[in-house]
Image (cartoon, coloured by chain):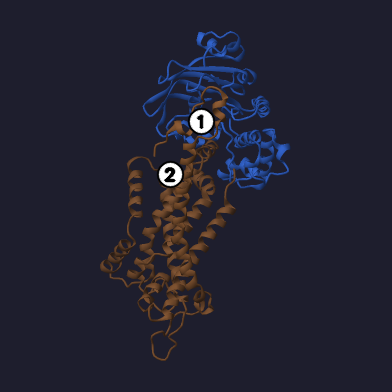
Chain colours: A blue, B brown
Amino acid sequence: MGKRIDVKDLNVFYSDFKAVEGVTMTVEPRSVTAFIGPSGCGKSTFLRTLNRMHEVTPGGRVEGKVMLDDEDLYAASVDPVAVRRTVGMVFQRPNPFPTMSIRDNVIAGLRLNGVKNKKVLDQKVEESLVGANLWNEVKDRLSKPGAGLSGGQQQRLCIARAIAVEPQVLLMDEPCSALDPISTLAIEDLVTQLKEQFTIVIVTHNMQQAARVSDRTAFFNLEATGKPGNLIEMDDTQQIFNNPSKKATEDYISGRFG
Amino acid sequence: MSIDTKEIAPAPTGDLGGLAQGRSGLRTLKNSIAGVVIWGAFLIALIPLGWILWTVLSRGLSPMLDATWWQKDQSGVGAPGFDHNVRGARHAIVGTLMIALGTSVIAIPIAVMTAIYLVEYGRGGAARAISFMVDILSGVPSIVAGLFIYAIWVTFFGWQLNGFGSSLALVLLMVPVVCRSTEEMLKLVPNELREASYALGVPKWKTIVKVVLPTSFSGIVTGSLLGFARVAGETAPLLILAQYSQFLNQNLFSGNIAALPTLINTNLPNMAGDPVSADRVWGAACTLILLVLVINLIGRLIGHFTKVKG
């Protein structure tokens, strides 16, 4: 599991507004890639193009190519629903389904896609919760509502829910920004574990977090408000934080702006 | 009313001594005046409510609490050799429930699906047009709805009048009420839940059926029951289409059918000289209020037990 993503000359639009311009990058399989950059630079928008969530927003569209191994995600014959089964996503705020128990939340993706076999589902519940480092905390209350967990547990529940459908890639849009430091640490440990199986892309505002968890880092920036965001540079995380090749990157990571 | 910020929050005048001078007299006065006005308005609004309840309960409670009220219709009343003093309303209670149920069965699915279209799918001109239509429909007087169905039912098709015709007219009144309340409930479902479902590779229609609707279920039920309560008290379409029958008619699709509002209407002319008619009128009014109360309670209970926490 874990596929490579190749993006070529991607422009992202909201109706007529160009939000991100000319991104070309490669995301290595079974590694963690972090997107950093100031607010409004389009890193979350770009992330959402990688599983075609961007077009859920009215007016959202892209130009260019996103290849998952050798499949073009934006080819006319590709169903966006199928793309999202292959490329999962974890959001900024934990969003377990409030009508469902912990167990039902984990297997929501499987169930809603027609898996009915109870043995398969039970096994998947345990496997995914173990995979999300949540099993020991919730194994005695699987039938309780998912909304009753703490914020950090809810976010791990959402990760369990996302990995239960066995995606190739896991996109994380600032997954720790609503969490306290201890829960953040738990998620970061989890990300390091998950990269053995999945290709992980994580958007973060926290540069220490990018430095701690990622193998490669991409820095996004925008020239001015109202202008599209660009990919400034992308390199090994060590390289970006110790010896960036662009002035803008250095200014940003040393805290001179953003 | 414009708010003078200087009065509400006087700027500190430098040292803390300025803050300790007590509350500004003018502001306290304004606060008291506003308080009196607000409480006064509240009490004035309560007077008619209390008055109505008192009048209806004091006159209608005793005929309603009698067993014959629920057991007997008014068969034979007016014919020679019968007891003219029967205070039974079974025919009207059953009629009201049947007509309102018939209305709900048709109106709720239409209203909920329209709301789903407007909130989840509707974009651009078509959605705006439909939303506008719903607004217009909610302003249609009930007698116009009744005449409209009459024009189709009798003038155009030449069919016999029956209870179902009045259900159809009431559908026109119920759809906008339920549609608007359902729309509000669907809008309350956070977009993050829809996105979470899409991100699992769940198609949009399934997201709506399995995530959005269950999350807003209690609100939709409450809104539907309020719509039911609203049409149960409607009168004009019933006068035109269901008319009135003193016999229990359990067939919505054949013949005239009584309802509580038309029972009131029928007995109203004799009310002054005939205590039995007066009892029927106030009993029916009381029963209608009880019906609306019970339906509201059911709605609240369903809402309470299915409410999504968190």
Residue A241, position as x, y percentages in the image: 60, 12
A36 up-or-down from B131: above or below: above
How many marks the image carries: the answer is: 2
| Residue B217 shows in this picture | yes
The residue lying toward the viewer, choosing from B122 and B67, is B67
Judge the density around disc 2: few (<14), some (14-19), many (≥20) Cα neighbours within 10 Å: some
- The chain letter for the residue carrying disc 1 is A
Residue A226 vs residue B261, the one in the foreground:
B261
Q: Give the secondary structure at mark 2.
A: helix
On screen, residue A20 above or below A148: above
- Residue A97 image position (x, y, % from top left): 58, 42
Q: Which residue is mark 1?
A: A51
Q: Amino acid at mark 2?
A: Val
- Measured from the top left, where is residue B54 in percent x and y? 48, 67
- Residue A133, located in which quarter of the rendered image? top right
Q: Nearer the viewer, residue B124 or B271?
A: B271
Residue labelled with disc 2? B119
Which amino acid type is shown beneath numbered disc 1? Asn
Residue A200 at x, y = what percent?
59, 25
Residue at the outermost bottom position: B81
